[in-house]
Image (cartoon, rainbow, N blue to C red):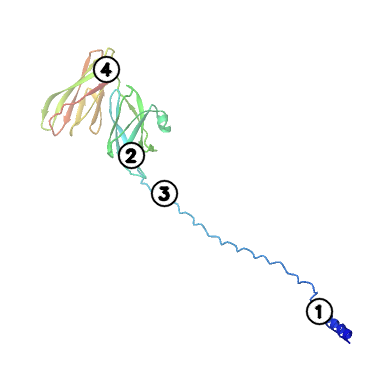
Amino acid sequence: MLRKLLTVTTVVLAGWAATTGVAAAAPTLSPPTAVAAPTPIAVATPTPVPTPAPTCPPALPISGRVTGATATSLTITYAIVLSPPCGFDPPVTVTLFAGRDDALRWQNPVAEATSGPERNGTVTIERLTPDTEYWYRFSDENDLPDPYVIGGAARTLPLAACRATATVDSRWGGGYVATVTVRNTGVEPLDRWHVSWRWAGDERIQAIWGGLADTEGADVTVGNASYNGTLAPDAVTTFGMLVATSTAPAELTLTCGR
């Protein structure tokens, strides 16, 4: 009886195990699905707006002219017309060149001098060679060259070979007559001469004889006439002039050269 009961129990347990699937295989797991990274959003870079170029008036930024010369110096008078960015602020530098091509290319400068703080003034360049031709250009304190003005030719005077003196012959309320004597002080004959000076006031030449006058503002240069340009050593000649002025005659500082 007991053996029969054990047999029945074993059969029941075997059936229960088959029903519950204790011996079944383990389930298969799928690998995780990869998640794509988000696409970055492109941000547009703003295009820089170019700074508009300045509009400059149709005028030269600076002007200049030679207003004085000795055997070893030149004086340049300048006027600054436009300020930056179209022009210059003082001081300005005047640079001399031996020829126009050098001045045009801004190469081989031979001398220079710098102005003061004035927008209108003069610059004197010294230690030059007598009786020599020069060309000049302007630049600012940062060595920025002016691209337009090429001045010249300007010539230094020869070494003094003559002397000039002035005498007032007669005067009245509105002017005077003067005679200028030119003497060859050298040891060689002169084939030409010129005398230059600057008026101190409102003087102006109304008539001249014995010479040819060239005036620019207060600056005067008188060259020889066709018949009195040749002077032997120690020889003299004269020219005369009728001068209109509202003031008494002032002493003239005369420069004589060949």
Q: Nearer the viewer, mark 3 or mark 4?
A: 3
Disc 2 vs disc 1: which is toward the camera?
1
Residue type at mark 2 is Ile
| Label 4: how many Cα within 10 Å (few below 14, some 14–19, many 20+) | some
Percent position of residue 107, x then y = 42, 30
Above/below status of 164 relative to 8: above
Label 1 or label 4, whichever lies nearer to me, is 1
**In the shown orientation, is residue 89 left or right of residue 52?**
left
Sooner in the amino-acid sequence: mark 1 or mark 4: 1
Q: Residue 16: x percent and y percent?
A: 81, 81
Crowding at label 2, few (<14), some or many (≥20) Cα neighbours within 10 Å? many
Classify 133 as above or below 25: above
Task: Give the mark, 3 or 4, whose residue is nearer the N terminus.
Answer: 3
Chain-order first, disc 1 or disc 3: 1
What is the distance, in whole Å, between disc 4 and disc 2 at their CAs?
Answer: 36 Å
Which is nearer the N-term, disc 2 or disc 3? 3
List the residue tagged with mark 3.
53
| Gap between marks 3 and 4 measured at Cα | 55 Å
Element type at mark 2: strand
The residue that label 2 is drawn on is 62
Residues under labels 1 and 4: Cα distance? 144 Å
Under mark 4, the amino acid is: Ala
Q: Is residue 220 left or right of residue 8?
A: left
Tell me which corner region of the image, top left, top right, bottom left or bottom right, holds residue 213: top left
Q: Are marks 4 and 2 in contact (CB under 8 Å)?
A: no
Helix, strand or loop status at disc 4: loop
Which corner quadrant holds the C terminus? top left
Q: In which image quadrant can residue 204 be found?
A: top left
Of the numbered discs in the image, which one, if any, rests on residue 17? Answer: 1
Residue annotated with mark 4? 161
Among the two numbered marks 4 and 2 on one chain, the one whose residue lies closer to the N terminus: 2
> Residue 236: horizontal and vertical position, in percent?
21, 16
